[in-house]
Each structure stands twice: as structure tokens, then as C-alpha cells.
Image: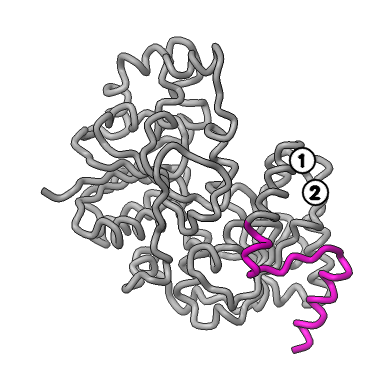
Amino acid sequence: MSEKILCSCNTPLQLLNMINITANMYPNSVVDVCISDKITNAELLCKKLKESNRFNSVFFVKTNSFIKNGGLHNSFISRVTAIFLANKKIKKFIPDFSSDYTYFLFGNFDSFSNLITINLPKAKKGWVEDGWASYHAQGAFWIKRPNGIKAWAKHIFRINYIYEHTDIQYLYRPKLALFNIPFSRVKIPFLSENPDNIFSKIYGFSQDDEIKEKYIYFDAPFEKDGIPTNDKDLLEKISSIVGKENILVKIHPRNNSDYYTAHGYHINKNTYIPWEVFFMSSENIEDKVLISGWSTASTSPYFYFNNNKIKSVLLVNLIDKSTFSESSIRDIELIKNMVFIPANSFVIPETEEELLSFFKAISER
């Protein structure tokens, strides 16, 4: 009997990783997928996924507001409801929900994933990599080891059910994880090992989508998150050397493009296609220079493709962190020192002078 797997995806990256895992690690399994309306153009993506015939069933689930409001966790009544009516609640999202899955794969410990976990007591629960935060920040439950009355209450009302019942963590580089867990870690095959480029087929990548600019800057939602910083000032200084016409800004899904268009930058018009698909499908990708604070996207050539040829510049030392919380600063420094620097695959300038010297040298080649 073949295994039956349910995947829950809140981001394009999670979808890519789950396709990679199921295609390479569970090739004979029957796979269903939930696509959240948190993803841009989610309904179009569902249509493409159905046409690809990669999945047995594709469910479009409107979970965005459910997750934002804490889902099951936003009132005492809803917490009690979670105990007695979890099966009824899941059918509001997936009317034909079945409990016969052998695996449930998820990328976030969110309310919807928790609800599915409660409804699949017999399935193995697999936590799938969702960027470098999976190597540290998302492990807070096991790092802090919560106890006391609050932890007991969360256990009773099944708020932490998904944490308590996770069985596997899937990572591309499990040896780099910075915390211990009471279950196994499994290595994911690199995306470059995928024999047929199913991702390009699903997203419909064509020559028109090729990136012409040499420099790709990955925008970050600092202001959206209430932590304004100097990221745009640093970009201005870089552009004064390499020219704005040579920079493509990939807008973060939670940001808009107003600032960049007003200041003369090129922006990615097709926000539907994930960066990793550009990487796999572009013919001249190794000629590019990637720039970000510490974006998962700009570190993905190393993390997901085992590619050390692309130059990726991380501004982590130069970003003004005066508005950041102490815990965020600690997390960033830990990731930098334990992951980015040992990887020996990134350019990490210590000063603005070093940053600008790098771009002067590379622009003259």
C-alpha cells in the first residue's frame, strides 16, 4: 500500500521544498497539497498544480485571516472548541478532509497546521525547511523549553499540539542546525538534483522572465515589521557605483514597490515566480551578484543548490539594528557566526568602505 501524504504550504518556497521531498524521497506516494491564500496568486497556482498532475488533490484554503487571528487560540471558547470540534473546524477549510494520511508535511507552526495535526493523530508529522530561520529561530519551543502554568495550559488546550507531536525535521543542511530536538533530522536532496525541472513547468518560466540586470537586490520588510533601518541608504550607495539601471529589486511579498519605482530602480514585474525557479531556469544566473541583509533568497544558492559560484553579498554587519529587539540581534549574530561565516560562500563586508570597494572592483571587470 502506497503512503499518503498531505502538504500544507504558506509560501512558494515551502511548496518547492515539499515537491522536492515528495518527488525524491517518497516517489511512489499519493500526495495532496493545501495552498494557502497567504501565497500571491494562490488560485492561479492551484490551477497550475492541478494541470501538472503532480498531486492527487489540490486544496485552495483560505487560512490567511485564520492564522493572523491566532486561529484556534484567540479566545478561551475557541480553545475549548479545539478540543471537541477540531474535526468540524477542519472541514470548513477542506470539506472532503480525510484522516487516512501517513505523513503530514508543514513549514510553519501556525494555527492551521496545528488544526490539521490534531486531526491526524496517526500520521507522522514532518517539519519542512522554510529558510534559515528553520536552523534556529523557529526552534524556540525546544530552545526555551517552556514549563509552568502557561505551558501546562497550552498543552491542555492543544495550542502546542503540533510542537509536541512533530516527528521529523527536513533540512538541506541538518548539520548546521543550532538547537537540539527530541526527534530525527533528515537531509533533503538539493534542488539541483531534481532530474526534470518540474518547478519551471508549474510556474511557466519562459525566456521573457530572464533577469537582464547583473545585480539582484532582495528587499526586506523592515518597515512593515516596525523596525525601520538603513537598508535603502546602503542600496543607494551601491547603486551610485554600479548604476540603478543594472539593479533589479525583488520586492518582498509584504512590501509594495512605491519607493523603488519612485527612485528609478527596476523591479521584478512577475512576483508569481519564486526566486528559486529563476535560479534553476535562467541560463546566465552564475553571472549575477546577489545582495541582501540576510535574506533566505540570497543564501539559497548555497543552502538549496550547493552552488558556491554565485557571489552573494550580505549586508548583515552594516544594517543599523538600533530599532531591533535584543533577541532579534542575538539571533542574527548567531546565524551569521555559526552559519554564514563558516559556509565560506558569502561576501560579508565589515565596513561601508569595504562594501563599496567590492562593488567598485566588480563593476570594473
Foreground: 180 or 311? 180
Going from N to C along the chain, the mark reached first, 1 or 2, is 2
Q: How is the image coloured?
A: one colour
How far across and how far down the image is residue 291, in percent?
69, 66
In the current view of this chain or complex, which residue is farthest to the bottom? Answer: 365
Name the residue: 40% across, 40% down: 183
Which disc, if any, is residue 338?
A: none
Q: Which amino acid type corresponds to the residue marked 2 in the rendered image?
A: Thr
Foreground: 362 or 345? 345
In what element is the residue under mark 1? loop
Say which quarter of the image contains residue 258. Answer: bottom right
Foreground: 275 or 243? 275
Instruction: Sort mark 2 into few (<14), some (14-19) or many (20+) by Cα contacts within 10 Å.
Output: some
Q: The magenta stretch spans which residues? A: 339-365
Name the residue: 49% across, 50% down: 130
Instruction: Sort mark 1 into few (<14), some (14-19) or many (20+) by Cα contacts within 10 Å.
Output: some
- Please state if 220 lies on the left or on the right of 72 as rendered: right
- Numbered label tally: 2
Foreground: 300 or 184? 184
In the current view of this chain or complex, which residue is farthest to the left? Answer: 1
Q: Which residue is mark 2?
A: 229
Q: Which residue is mark 1?
A: 324
User: Marks 2 and 1: in contact by CB < 8 Å?
Assistant: yes
How far across and how far down the image is residue 233, in percent?
83, 59
Q: Is residue 214 magenta?
A: no
Q: Is residue 352 magenta?
A: yes
- Please state if 45 lies on the left or on the right of 233 as rendered: left
What is the quadrant of the C terminus in the image? bottom right
How far across and how far down the image is residue 3, in percent?
19, 48
